Amino acid sequence: MHGFGVFHPKTDRPYFDAWLRRTGRQFAVSGRLTQTAAALSATEGGTVEEWRSRLRTVLEGGEEPSLDLLVRIDTLLAGPSRKLCRDDCQGSLF
């Protein structure tokens, strides 16, 4: 046997696979997937439910999103930059 016709998972996408694992852990936090779907709906169009479904499909490996979408999701999950938060937080303390 030479292994022809046997399905092997893609091994040429280690960064995407690592992104899937990390993002899956972040979406495991209650409400995080819905928050991200709502933000994407507001900026990219479509309904929150459509984005929730699409995000689940991506996490299950059913869709490989564009690099732009990956970066957008990472940006949303990262939250505001520390510099912005530091400036805003300090201003609101006094």
Image (cartoon, helix red, strand yellow):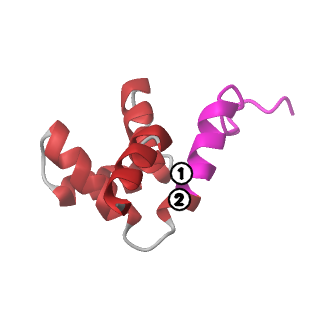
Residue 93 showing in the rendered view:
yes
**Residue 10: where, in percent of width, then height?**
66, 33
The residue that appears at 13% across and 53% down in the rendered structure is: 47
Q: Quadrant of the N terminus?
A: top right
The residue that appears at 47% across and 61% down in the rendered structure is: 27
**Residue 59: where, in percent of width, then height?**
48, 52
- Amino acid identity at mark 2: Gln
For this view, does 80 lie left or right of residue 16? left
In magenta segment, residue 10: yes
Viewer-closest of 76 and 58:
76
The circle drawn on residue 23 is 1
In magenta segment, residue 21: yes
- Amino acid identity at mark 1: Thr
Outermost residue, front side: 94
**Residue 63: where, in percent of width, then height?**
41, 40
At label 1, counting other C-alpha atoms closer than 10 Å, the crowd grade (few under 14, some 14-19, many 20 or more) is some
Q: Which residues are magenta?
A: 1-24
Q: Quadrant of the C terminus?
A: bottom left
Outermost residue, right side: 1
The residue that appears at 22% across and 55% down in the rendered structure is: 38
The circle drawn on residue 26 is 2
Viewer-closest of 67 and 82:
82
Element marked by disc 2: helix
